[in-house]
Amino acid sequence: MADSARSLDDTEQHGGKPGRFTGMGPFMLVWSGQAVSLVGNSVLRFAFVFETWSATGRATALTTLSLCALLPQVLLSPLAGALVDRVSRRIALQLADGGGLLIVALLSVLHFSGGLHTWEVYAAVMLLGGAAAFQFPALGAAVPLLVDKSRLQRANSLLASAKSTADVGGPALGGLLVAFSGLGFVLVADLVSFALALAAVRVVRLTGDTRPVPDEGGGPRKRLVAEAVEGMRFLFRHPSLRDLMLAFCVVNLVMVFGFAAVQPMVLARSGGETAALASVNTAIGVGGIAGGLLMAAWSGPRNRARGMLLGIIGMCLSAQVAMALAGGVAGWCAAILVGAALMPMINGVMQAIVQTKVPQEWHGRVFGAVVFLSQISVPVATAVSGPLADHVFEPRAADGTGVFRVLGPLVGDGPGSGMAGMLLIAGLCGIAVGVLSMTRRTVREIDTLLPDIDAEPGGTTGDGAGTEAGKPATTDDSGRPGDPEGPEKPDNPENKELVEG
């Protein structure tokens, strides 16, 4: 590959000893632009929260604002992924950043021409969520064109650390800018961040980035919705990817259910000390940044699936079980910092697996499906956890009834004990899912059962067809979407019984 040749040239220039980030110059430029844009978006979100609270004074308004940002991103991700696969990766990245730029520009015009109304903020946040739906599929599909396969986990971890940096630095910077400069300056700063991200995408060369060629045969192109469904079907047609994603989705569900109780639990058990909550939130951000940087320097476990599952078990054990059992701010911060540090490794490995097992021409649709499956549980778990904490777990913990006959000695019976019990149960369920997934050979040995796509840059041959082990991928005789290898071409012929489930 061209990237590999460029990396070898860099190695020779450094006396045969490659640096950790040798050959990652183009990616680092794109990463820098995306990191600046993420910080700008985080600052703007904080400003919107402040403005909405000032205008309404209601917590429900803030919850609605969060849902306006999250739901469009989750629900539109499959469609965004299908659209990403219809255009070049450069154009896909420009759609994500350019869409955000246009929306923030419109907001700036409205603000400077007479001020923003609350409903306009809600509408803008929904539009920004829709633009963000393109970002993960576009980045997931573009990263393999910017670095060679051996650096995918490192690159994905750097992206994770950029998000953690934005989550930590954005609110702090947003507080200062809103206090001293106002919303107008924040909007202009976000415009500049989008412009920098767009400029970085424009100047970088994406090796092998070509516009996808429609399927041969002269028939009409499938509808966008049908292609979005193909991404989901692709995951479920390959047992190794299917089982890995199902494990990831279930863990996400139980972990979000537990994590939704973290902030109210800290406030309840600390007597409402905002300093305690701020310390825990800071620990989450610091852990995410540190974990991403460590993963980037290390480049990840050799056995990717096993390393990811061990990371999930470790995160559940630290950020949920230990967090629930800890008795003070120092213990909470230490426990959740370790869990947050493991998150970039888990996400980086999962993305690298998809990037190396899925043909390049399917990356957008598959990553869109990944976002949908992994994030659809967030609003559901968040909505359910609050009422359960208030009306089931907290009263049972105070009375020592139900499951708290067993958990009571571990989490106590004071304020916040019920939510600590929720966190403990969620952590134990996550550990169980990780252990059970480890027993599944389709997951544990995914690198053996499902070989990496081995092709020219972009994972395609000259005519746009995906390849495996250097050979063109065959098409399914039945014409079913999402099965480029065909029913007679399982992940590994020696393990056909595993592949066919």
Image (tube, grey):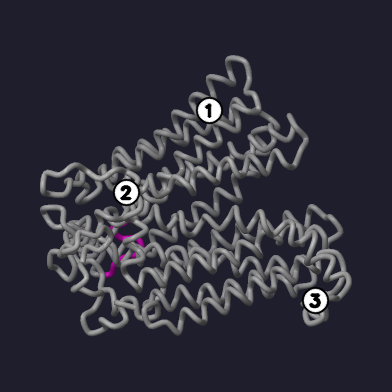
Gap between marks 1 and 3 measured at Cα: 54 Å
Mark pair 3, 2: CA separation: 47 Å
* Sequence-earlier tag: 1 or 3: 1
Q: Nearer the viewer, mark 1 or mark 2?
A: 2
Quadrant of the snapshot with the N terminus = bottom left
231 left or right of 316? left
- Mark 3 / mark 2, whichever is N-terminal: 2
For the residue marked with disc 3, what is the amino acid? Gly
User: Mark 1: few, some, or many residues within 10 Å (few <14, many ≥20)?
Assistant: some
Q: Can I make out residue 294 in this image?
A: no
| Residue found 78% across the figure and 35% down from its top | 57
Q: Earlier in the sequence, mark 1 or mark 2?
A: 1
Q: Amino acid at mark 1?
A: Val
Residue positioned 68% across, 39% down in the render = 175
Name the mark on residue 188. Answer: 1
Question: Is 219 situated left or right of 187 in this image?
Answer: left
Q: Main secondary structure of the magenta part?
A: loop
Residue that badge 3 annotates: 402
Find numbered disc 2 in the image and state the secondary structure of the residue it sits on.
Answer: helix
Q: Is residue 66 above or below residue 475?
A: above
Residue drawn 75% across the image and 32% down it? 56
**Image coords of residue 99 (percent x, y):** 42, 34
* Residue placed under numbered mark 2 in the picture: 226
Q: In the figure, residue 380 lies in which quadrant?
A: bottom right
Q: Nearer the viewer, residue 392 or 439?
A: 392
- Magenta stretch? 17-26
